[in-house]
Amino acid sequence: MGTAFESNVAAPGNGGRRMGSALAPQVRPRGDATERYQQLADEDRGTGGESLADFLGFFSIGLGLIQVPTLFLNLVLLPPILLGVMVGRWLTRIVPQELFNRLLLMFAGIAALRLLGLF
């Protein structure tokens, strides 16, 4: 499933000026790709009677924002995320609060220096 975008679109009610989206200044999803989702949004206060999660999920799939490779990547990354949660919970019992605060300030300082290009 690919995305369906069009460029340099004249927006209705916009005086014929070109209108983009958050995707790019002059790009937005094609009307035929979003028509059925817009109909759902127009009915029953935005969800067409569906749960909001279902509505947003189908909307994102219809626009091509969610694809099989990204779902596969999410599945591959799930075990390391769960491992990180377990290790993090274990570390909260071991690391004293004062040490945690000092480490936090030290890493924040290093990040600030890197953002400034000094490190």
Image: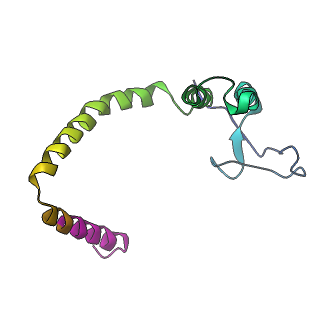
Q: Nearer the viewer, residue 37 or 29?
A: 37
Q: Nearer the viewer, residue 9 or 107?
A: 107
* Numbered circles on residues, count: 0
**What quarter of the picture does the C terminus occupy?**
bottom left
Does 5 lie within the magenta span? no
* Residue 56 placement (x, y as % from top left): 58, 31
* Residue 106 placement (x, y as % from top left): 21, 70
Residue drawn at 27 percent across, 37 percent down: 81
Structure colour scheme: rainbow
Does 114 lie within the magenta span? yes
Residue drawn at 16 percent across, 61 percent down: 97
Residue 2: quadrant of the picture = top right
Q: In this rendering, would 13 be left or right of 111?
A: right
Q: Nearer the viewer, residue 65 or 27?
A: 65
Q: In this rendering, would 19 be left or right of 23?
A: right
From what the image shows, is residue 95 above or below residue 62? below
Which span is picked out in magenta?
Answer: 103-119
Q: Residue lying at the far left in this picture: please name it.
A: 94
Residue 99: quadrant of the picture = bottom left
From what the image shows, is residue 26 above or below residue 103? above
Residue drawn at 61 percent across, 28 percent down: 55
Residue drawn at 79 percent across, 44 percent down: 9
Q: In this rendering, would 6 be left or right of 93?
A: right
From what the image shows, is residue 48 above or below residue 18? above
Q: Main secondary structure of the magenta part?
A: helix
**What quarter of the picture does the N terminus occupy?**
top right
* Residue 15 placement (x, y as % from top left): 90, 52
* Residue 59 placement (x, y as % from top left): 62, 29
